[in-house]
Image: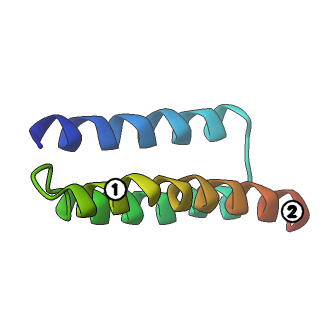
């Protein structure tokens, strides 16, 4: 579980840096904030001994990506 705590901020940092380089609007960066909250929820609820819970959290990665994409799309329209 400790590796998850290290990897989650790293992936969010890379995404945030990419949006900063692209000069994305604030609303797009808010999508990253939503994804960060979601990632914290995933790490807090991680239980590798419970296969049903593990599968639920794995499937929740779709929501992680959707939060980022929705923020980017909103950023395109709400400049």
At a point 45% along the width and 60% down the height, the residue shown is 60
Q: Circle 1 sits in a helix, a strand or a loop, which is it?
A: helix
At a point 79% along the width and 65% down the height, the residue shown is 74
11 lies above or below 47: above
At a point 54% along the width and 39% down the height, the residue shown is 15
20 lies above or below 48: above
Residue 68: x and y, percent?
62, 55
57 lies above or below 18: below
Q: Left or right of 56: which side holds 78?
A: right
Crowd tier of the residue under label 1, counting other residues whose Cα lies within 10 Å: few below 14, some 14–19, many 20 or above: few
Residue 53: x and y, percent?
25, 63
Residue 9: x and y, percent?
32, 42
Q: What number is the disc on residue 5? A: none
Q: What number is the disc on residue 55? A: 1
Front position in the image: 48 or 44: 48
Q: What number is the disc on residue 79? A: 2
- Which is closer to the viewer, label 2 or label 1? 1
The C terminus sits in image quarter? bottom right
1 lies above or below 55: above
């Amino acid at each position: 579980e400790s590796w998850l705590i290290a990897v989650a901020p790293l992936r969010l940092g890379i995404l945030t840096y990419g949006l900063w380089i692209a000069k994305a609007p604030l609303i797009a960066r808010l999508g990253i904030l939503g994804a960060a909250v979601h990632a914290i929820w995933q790490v807090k609820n991680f239980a590798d001994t419970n296969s049903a819970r593990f599968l639920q959290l794995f499937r929740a990665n779709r929501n992680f990506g959707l939060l980022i994409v929705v923020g980017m799309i909103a950023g395109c329209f709400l400049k």
